[in-house]
Image (cartoon, helix red, strand yellow):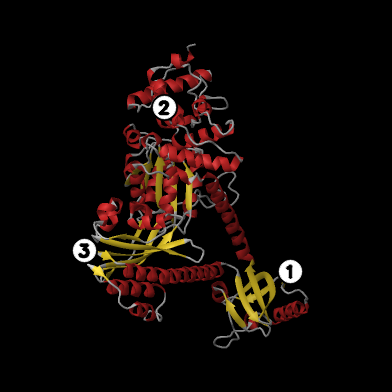
Amino acid sequence: MELGMRDYGRYKEVFDNLSELKGEAWFKALVNRLAVSLRVSTAWVSEYHNASDTLKALSFIHNNKYHNGISYSSRATVCGQVLDDRSLLSVENQVLDEFPQSKAYLERFKPQAYLGAPLHDLDGKLIGVIAIGHANSIGFDEKTLDVFRLFADKVSVALQKHKREEEAKNKELQLKGLIDGIQDLLINFDKDGDVIMTNTAARNHLLWKQHEPDRPSIYGFLNKKDRSDVDRMIYKLGKSKEQDSFLYFPEGFQVLAATGETLEVEGTLNRYELNGKWYFTMVLRSMIQKIQAEQELRSLVDRTQYLQQELEEVKVTSQLIGESEPVKMLWQDIYMVAHTDATVLVFGETGTGKELVSRQIHQISNRKAKPLVSINCGAIPANLMESELFGHVKGAFTGAVSDRKGRFELADGGTVFLDEIGELPLEMQVKLLRVIQEQEFEPVGSDKTMKVDVRIVAATNRNLKELARKGEFREDLYYRLNVFPIEVPALRERGDDVLTLTRNFIQKFEARMGRKMNELSVVQKKVLKSYHWPGNVRELQNIIERAVIVSKDGHMDLAKVLGIGAVNPEEMEPGDKALTEDKVLTKEEMLAFERRNIIRALKHCQGKVSGKGGAAELMNMAPTTLSSRIRALGIRKGIYEKS
C-alpha cells in the first residue's frame, strides 16, 4: 500500500480546522484527522515524562475508537527507539518481529507497520512522541514522511503549549488550595474598605452584617471601636514611604463570628500596590486557633524531619540500571502493579535496592503527589514503635508533652514503605494488620479512631513464610502483605549489569573527587563478574568508592580492594581461584566461598561481629545480616577462633 501526498494544502486544513479547539480536545481531534488522512487504523500522541522514563498517551485512537489512560515504559516499546534516536522511525512490515520488546503493549492493536517521530520543545528537550500504526504492511513514500514531519513540528508546538497551560493551571490550583487551606482568615480589600477577595476560612467564620450582594465591606464584621483602629492603621500605612509595608495588631481586637458570637483575634495588615492603586490584606487568627496552629506547626516540623530523613536515605537510582533479563522483569512487575492500590511485598538480599523499588512504585502510581513515608522496622525501639506508626496524644506517656502525628497519618493519601518488615514486633503486627484491612487506628493514649487512605509497600531480606511457620511472624499478616510479591534480583544474577553499574559509580566518584580513572581492563571485568557480591549493589558502590580513593595514576586495584589479592595464589582453594579466572561459579561454590570469606573476616577481627572494628564493618554488611549468614552457613565459634 503506497501513501502518496498530492496536495500539502489538504493537510494544512487539518490544523486550520482544529484552531477552535484547545487542550485534550485538540489532541483527540488531531489523532482522528491523522488516522483518517493517512488511512491508518491507529494514531496517537504521547507525552514523555523524563523522571520516570514513561510515555503517557494524551490521545490514542484505534479503529475509530478512543482509548484513555494508556501509560507505558519507554524501555518496553518501539516509541523508546524513537526517543533514543531522536529521529523519525519507519517500519513498513512486521513491527512486532523487529521490536519484540513492544509485544506486551502493541499486541492488543496488532500493527504490522509503524511510523513515529519525536516531539521537542524549543530547547530541543524531548517532550513526547507522535506515531501511527496500521494492521497491514505500508510503504511510506517520501511525501508521506515529509507530511508526517510537518505533523510532528505542529504537534511539538501544541504539546509545549499544552504543558505550559497545564503547569499554569496546576500552579493556580495549588495557590488556591494553599490560600483556602490556611486556617487564618485572609481578607483582601481596596482603600475604601470594599472586599475584593477572601479565603474559605474568612467566608465561613465571619458575620458580614453590612454588604452589597458581591462587595461586602471590611467594616461589616467590626464593632465601632475596632473600625476606628483599623481606619488609623490604614491611614498610617497610606503615609508609609515603603512600597510594601505592614502593621501588626499588638493588642488584637474583636470580630463578629458567623455564629453571632464575639471572637478574639490577632493579626496583621499589609499594603501593596497594583496597577497604580493601593490594596490591603488583613490576616486574622483567633487566639484559640493560634494554639491549634502551634500544634499544626509542630506536626509540620515532624513531617519536615521525616521528609529530610527520606532525602538522606534516598539511594542512587543507578541500582535499577541494567539490561539484564532479571532487571527487565523487575521493571515489568513495577509498572504492572504501580497504578493499582495493591499491597506489595518486595523481597531480596540486602543491598539490592528494595527501598528504591518502593520509590519507583510510588512515583509511577496515582499517589505520587502525596507523601511516601518510610519506616525502618528494625531501627525503631519496640517501646516507641506504636507511637512512631500511629502517633500519640499529650500525656499518653512520660515525655509526651504534646500531640504528635504518626507516620501513617502523615502518609494519608500516599504510600507507607515498611522496610525490614520481618523485624516488626509481634504485638505490633496485630495493629498493622488492622490498618491494612480497615485503614484505621487509634493514636497512643487516645480513644479516637483515625481513618487513613494509604498504600502499603513492605520489604524484607528474610523468609517471612518460614518465620510464620516458626511462629515468629503472623501468618495472616504475611498473606495480607504478599498480595503482589516482587523479587529484586541479586547482583550476581544480573550478568553484565555489574559492569554498567561500575561505570556509573566510577563517573559519580570521578566527579566528586576530581579524578580520572582508566577504562576497565579485561582482568578487572573478570574480577567484577566473578565476585559473588554478598552485599550486592550497595557493596559494589562502596568498593568502587574505595578503589577510586586508593587508585594510583587512574588505575584501580579491584582485586586488592575486594581482598582477593591479599590471598597467596598458591594457597587459594579452588572456589577462591575461580574469582580470578573466567569461570561461572555454581551455587554450591558461591556458598562455599562466602563461608570461607566470612571465616577469614572473623579471624581478622578476633571473632568480633558488630561494632567498631567488627567483621560486619570490615565486610560492609549490616550486623544483623552477617549474623544471619553465620547461622545459615553453620559457622561455629570454634572454627574461626582457631589460629
Q: Which residue is drawn at 54% across and 42% down?
A: 508
- Compare marks 3 and 1 and give the one earlier in the sequence: 3
Residue 458: percent from left, percent from top: 40, 44
Identity of the amino acid at label 1?
A: Pro
Foreground residue among 524 and 139: 139
- Compare marks 2 and 1 and give the one earlier in the sequence: 1
Circle 1 crowding by C-alpha within 10 Å: few under 14, some 14–19, many from 20: few
Identity of the amino acid at label 3?
A: Asn
Q: Name the residue under label 2.
A: 629
Side of 320 where 301 appears, left or right = right
Q: Mark 3 points at which residue?
A: 136
Side of 93 where 203 appears, left or right = right
Q: In which quarter of the image is residue 47?
A: bottom left
Q: Which of marks 2 and 1 is in front?
A: 2
Q: How far apart are marks 3 and 1 (CA)?
A: 79 Å
Question: Given the current orientation, which residue lies at the most extreme top position?
Answer: 643
Q: How many labels does the image show?
A: 3
Q: Distance between the residues labelled 2 and 3?
A: 58 Å
Cβ–Cβ under 8 Å for marks 3 and 1 = no
Mark drawn on residue 250: 1
